[in-house]
Image (cartoon, rainbow, N blue to C red):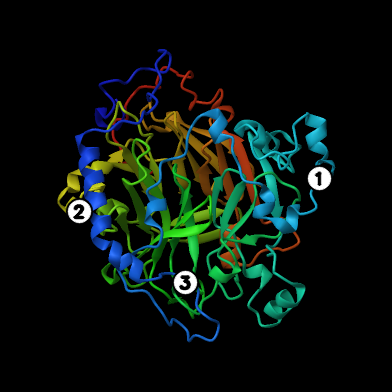
């Protein structure tokens, strides 16, 4: 059986009419009670301290560089009551609520009318910005059903850019930024993607000089092919003058409680000789209903190893308990995971030999490019949360590696995890030559999707079946539109969609981008459509579908 019989108690072949995971329900057991009680006591004890300080307040422009740098290992709670609020409701009526887009994107929608978008009338859908109480699925249908820019298998290209541009407050400020090389268009590269309600978030780490904004947003429903990016949460948050602001973001994740967890690496000029750990890495958590900061955590100095780079984050919430949340953040260059616990702000770092790169997988081939990378643990995906399985699995892999691994998250959530080396295990066979994967996700039905960066492809795996090459499918492959799919995320809709961003990163790093061509794309596909008829479809099986591998070591 797959996963060392992890699911042996309730596992059934796909043909049996059983759901893989029962829908989770809100319940409170003894453990929940103690966690809540401890959190409540902690909050009461520290409340006078929280009220005495105002953290993460933007500094004045004349402050010196790094003035006001936060204390390492600190956990700030500006609005902790909001951080503890109840999760989003899941009823169709409540989940359909969405704030008017003009609140966030006045430049785009201040003069927007239904007649500006021909697809609204041609498809018979209502104007998505006219009614804030549109049913959820209808509000977002247009993104999938309107005429796409391109089609790549089940994926539809919603946006594409040759170079990125930003919505500066004025043309004068933009011209000044270009003249001072504070904005160099060809040096900006989108890396991470996330989706929440009517917004798509993109991250632009500061690889080179001239990246003015490191976290931005665009409308989920396209209104133009290559829109300017809107800084998130606003322009004032993007500056290198103080470490209290946002420095350089690789990835972020939205949780089920309507919060955006932003992992700020603190590194700038990453690919140049001037590369520096400009600010300590930090975690920022924003309320997506108000766009206000809820909480921040500044990494302890002992977690910031020389030449390390925190580049990916995944958030673990059980039973819709917004207080009992953990973040797992991976250090791709110094091979570790930092676990952050929300309710008390504590954190610890985990090391394991499976986090290291595989030297046999360090050679990449992408079209005519040949290069070597030694990137360690990078992609992470969580198995669905359910009542039938109190624990969850964290799947993980190195960027420079062909194998997938896993660990029960109950080990990660304990500070003594270093003593549990046996908990980290290999998952079946390797993906084979050039089976490098950047990011991965697992949907509510236990289907994993992942980016095969060297193969211009998106792969999939049904976790009911053993992890063998015969069960690893492709949902899309395109040598033009899917060149280096870097990040992949799932939305929270009842019918889930996956969202990917492609960015031709090796070209950007090695020979520069051809700005006469489209280099960056935001693409989306329904997960159920993507796997239909593939080996990842639970209803598809063959003679060898449930045959375990003879060994899990082979690299080729």
Height in image: 365 above or below 426?
below
Q: Is residue 416 left or right of residue 298?
A: left
User: Mark 3–mark 2 contact, CB under 8 Å?
Assistant: no
Image mark count? 3
At x 23% / y 60%, what residue is drawn?
A: 45
Q: In the rendered structure, find residue 147 and report the number of the disc placed on it.
A: none
Q: Which residue is mark 2?
A: 415
In the picture, the quarter occupied by the N terminus is top left
Q: Position of residue 550 (x, y in %)?
A: 29, 30
> Would you identify the image quadrant in which residue 406 lies?
top left
Q: Which residue is mark 1?
A: 113
Residue in front for this viewpoint, 518 or 109: 109
In the picture, the quarter occupied by the C terminus is top left
At x 36% / y 34%, what residue is drawn?
A: 385
> Would you identify the image quadrant in which residue 276 lies?
bottom left
Height in image: 411 above or below 42?
above
Of tags 2 and 1, the one toward the viewer is: 1
Say which label, 2 or 1, has the lower sequence index: 1
Q: Is residue 192 visible?
A: yes
How packed mark 2 is, by other alpha carbons closer than 10 Å (few <14, some 14-19, many 20 or more), is some
Tell me the CA gap for discs 2 and 1: 54 Å
- Residue extending furthest top? 16
> Would you identify the image quadrant in which residue 464 lies?
top left
Say which label, 3 or 2, has the lower sequence index: 3
Residue in front for this viewpoint, 174 or 404: 174
Q: Position of residue 12 (x, y in %)?
A: 35, 17
Q: Which residue is mark 3?
A: 57
Q: Report helix, strand or loop for mark 3.
A: loop
Q: Report helix, strand or loop for mark 2.
A: loop
């Amino acid at each position: 059986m797959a996963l060392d019989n992890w699911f042996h108690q309730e596992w059934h072949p796909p043909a049996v009419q059983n759901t893989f995971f029962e829908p989770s329900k809100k319940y409170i057991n003894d453990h929940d009670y103690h966690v809540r009680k401890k959190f409540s006591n902690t909050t009461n004890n520290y409340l006078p301290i929280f009220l005495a300080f105002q953290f993460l307040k933007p500094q004045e422009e004349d402050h010196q560089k790094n003035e006001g740098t936060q204390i390492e290992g600190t956990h700030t709670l500006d609005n902790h009551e909001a951080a503890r609020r109840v999760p989003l409701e899941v009823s169709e009526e409540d989940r359909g609520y969405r704030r008017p887009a003009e609140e966030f994107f006045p430049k785009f929608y201040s003069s927007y009318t239904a007649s500006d978008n021909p697809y609204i009338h041609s498809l018979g859908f209502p104007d998505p910005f006219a009614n804030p109480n549109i049913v959820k699925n209808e509000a977002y249908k247009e993104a999938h059903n309107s005429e796409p820019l391109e089609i790549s298998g089940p994926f539809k290209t919603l946006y594409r850019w040759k170079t990125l541009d930003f919505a500066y407050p004025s043309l004068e400020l933009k011209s000044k930024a270009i003249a001072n090389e504070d904005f160099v268009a060809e040096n900006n590269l989108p890396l991470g993607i996330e989706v929440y309600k009517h917004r798509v978030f993109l991250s632009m780490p500061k690889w080179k000089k001239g990246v003015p904004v490191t976290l931005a947003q665009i409308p989920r429903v396209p209104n133009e092919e290559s829109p300017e990016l809107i800084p998130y949460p606003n322009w004032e948050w993007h500056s290198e003058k103080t470490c209290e602001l946002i420095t350089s973001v690789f990835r972020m994740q939205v949780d089920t409680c309507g919060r955006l967890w932003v992992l700020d690496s603190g590194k700038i000029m990453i690919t140049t000789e001037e590369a520096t750990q400009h600010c300590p890495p930090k975690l920022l958590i924003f309320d997506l209903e108000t766009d206000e900061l809820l909480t921040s955590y500044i990494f302890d100095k002992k977690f910031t190893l020389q030449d390390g780079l925190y580049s990916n984050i995944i958030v673990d919430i059980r039973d819709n308990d917004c207080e009992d949340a953990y973040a797992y953040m991976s250090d791709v260059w110094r091979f570790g995971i930092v676990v952050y616990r929300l309710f008390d702000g504590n954190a610890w770092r985990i090391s394991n030999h499976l986090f290291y790169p595989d030297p046999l997988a360090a050679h990449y081939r992408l079209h005519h490019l040949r290069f070597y990378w030694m990137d360690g643990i990078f992609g992470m995906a969580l198995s669905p949360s359910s009542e039938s399985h109190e624990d969850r699995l964290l799947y993980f892999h190195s960027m420079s590696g062909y194998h997938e691994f896993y660990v029960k998250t109950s080990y990660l959530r304990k500070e003594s995890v270093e003593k549990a080396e046996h908990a980290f295990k290999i998952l079946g066979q390797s993906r084979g030559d050039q089976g490098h994967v950047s990011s991965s996700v697992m949907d509510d039905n236990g289907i994993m999707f992942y980016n095969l960066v060297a193969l211009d492809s998106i792969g999939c795996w049904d976790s009911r079946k053993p992890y063998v090459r015969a069960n690893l499918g492709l949902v899309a492959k395109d040598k033009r539109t899917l060149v280096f799919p870097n990040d992949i995320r799932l939305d929270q809709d009842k019918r889930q969609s996956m969202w990917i961003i492609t960015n031709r990163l090796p070209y950007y790093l090695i020979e520069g981008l051809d700005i006469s061509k489209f280099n960056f794309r935001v693409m989306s596909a329904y997960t159920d459509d993507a796997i239909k008829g593939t080996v990842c479809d639970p209803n598809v099986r063959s003679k060898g579908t449930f045959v375990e591998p003879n060994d899990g070591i082979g690299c080729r």
